[in-house]
Amino acid sequence: MAGAGLRAAARRWVPRRDHGGPRAASSSPSCPGCGPPGPGAHCPGAPRSAPAPAPAGGAAEPSAHLWARYQDMRRLVHDLLPPEVCSLLNPAAIYANNEISLRDVEVYGFDYDYTLAQYSDTLHPEIFNAARDILVEHYKYPEGIRKYEYNPSFAIRGLHYDIQKSLLMKIDAFHYVQLGTAYRGLQPVPDEEVIELYGGTQHIPLYQMSGFYGKGPSIKQFMDIFSLPEMALLSCVVDHFLGHGLEFDQAHLYKDVTDAIRDVHVKGLMYQWIERDMEKYILRGDETFAVLSRLVAHGKQLFLITNSPFSFVDKGMRHMVGPDWRQLFDVVIVQADKPSFFTDRRKPFRKLDEKGSLHWDRITRLEKGKIYRQGNLFDFLRLTEWRGPRVLYFGDHLYSDLADLMLRHGWRTGAIIPELEREIRIINTEQYMHSLTWQQALTGLLERMQTYQDAESRQVLAAWMKERQELSLGASSAPSTTPPTSRGGWCASPTSTWPPSAACSTTAWTSPSTRAAPPCSTRRRSGWTSSAPAA
């Protein structure tokens, strides 16, 4: 990327004691970001508080030299990023974190929910409302909770929740809380308080986050798309208790909200909504049919492993593919109980008949056209002999669908990430491209010029460090205080990074006109921002 080249260029420059130095001729001298020094000058994408160059007359020579290098680099950034450099990434493309030859893939596997069946966002408010009402009616929570409505802009996947502290926040791959990302209820928590809560550090010990599926002993990571209404409801309930001065046990509240969300699934409420109006809730069914038919036409073997019940899957697949959908799959497994399906050897496969009744006969082979329930991956591998990289499995949950299969069994995996389309559109904007490139260039300047240690030069370097931090946070504005009853919410920041923890060597897969979102995301003061890879 251009930013990396600029960063290297900044490091190669040799400091000079005159005020001259390498200067790139600006093709647009009138550009507010690359014109002559002056108060408030900044490149597109730079924060409003970007430091202005020092006045030409009274500055000490070393600091004037630093500001000259600063302006040179800004002009260079502008010249290297013409408007046509944006929109380089295709939002509907397939992105791979590892090399893969589809010619070598013989077997394709799929999850069902949010993989073969893509659901409309209108499903989330109904999950939120149903779970909220369960809390009031069955768990006897205060009636005042009913005033809260689902805010789709409040949270994104990948956030962590500290159960004992009631904090929803972003934690990076190195287990550090990202400052400016912590919320208790619906209110931001000051950075100083966050550091104090964790004993004067931003670091969360490994033992608190040791659960491989994001379920540590005191911290939970929300990874699947169904967790969006759960995070929103959890924050709304905490907000109500805090706002009304009600005492509560954090662990009890967390468990009650989690159980209420689970009841929406276990009691079949969500399945009923979707079955009543599949046109409303299921998206792009024709694309699902096209993909599956094309794979079968090219001699590929297909299998389906889902936690959903057969009656629900059957109705959805009939809607998307047709009554003969089972003839496309060599193996169909429902109510698989993932993620334990991938780790627990004890549960055997059971065969289901057309009415969903269980058979008692022992399963010695998995037959095409038949329906199986539960089971485990080890028996699945033994009965099918589908092993290693010739298998490509698609799912929406990086942990329970994908990581185990790749790390333990060598399958190739693909992540269906609906949010990625929007993230790539943000990356393609001129503001994002300039912000990212200027951040890289500024980093290079800091690395090269840190040898200047006189008092005035240290002030200049401190100003650059502050600007770089603001670029990283995308925090040029304060957070909105929009209440949860409004659909206003916060605006996402265009400045985001791709956490190393998200790079699980999976293939981020989207079919034509699809979408996709990074599993690990970032909470900014100006809103939650999910992260996207710079492909």
Image (cartoon, rainbow, N blue to C red):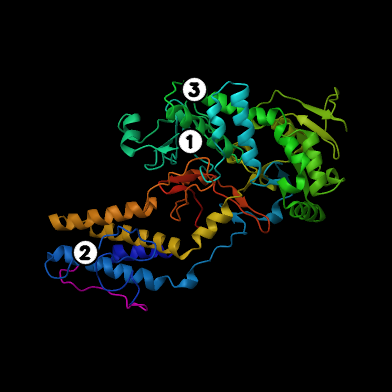
Which quarter of the image is occupied by the N terminus? Answer: bottom left
Residue 455 colored magenta? no
Dot placed on the residue nearer the N-terminal end, 1 or 3: 1
Give the x, y percent position of residue 483: 48, 41
Instruction: Tell me the element at label 2.
Output: helix
Residue closest to the eye, 183 or 534? 183
Number of marks in the rendered image: 3
Rounded to the nearest whole Å, what is the CA distance between mark 2 and mark 3? 53 Å
| Residue 514 versus residue 119 in the image, above or below | below
Which residues lie in the magenta part?
16-29
Q: Amino acid at mark 3?
A: Ala
Question: Foreground mark, 2 or 1?
Answer: 1
Residue closest to the eye, 470 or 94? 470
Rounded to the nearest whole Å, what is the CA distance between mark 2 and mark 1? 41 Å
Q: Which residue is mark 1?
A: 160
Q: Which residue is mark 3?
A: 251
| Residue 10 versus residue 467 in the image, above or below | below
Dot placed on the residue nearer the N-terminal end, 2 or 1: 2
Question: Foreground mark, 2 or 3?
Answer: 3
Q: Pointers 1 and 3 in contact (CB under 8 A)?
A: no
Residue closest to the eye, 144 or 128? 144
Q: Main secondary structure of the magenta part?
A: loop
Q: Which residue is mark 2?
A: 66
Give the x, y percent position of residue 224: 59, 39
Dot placed on the residue nearer the N-terminal end, 2 or 3: 2
Residue closest to the eye, 261 or 221? 261
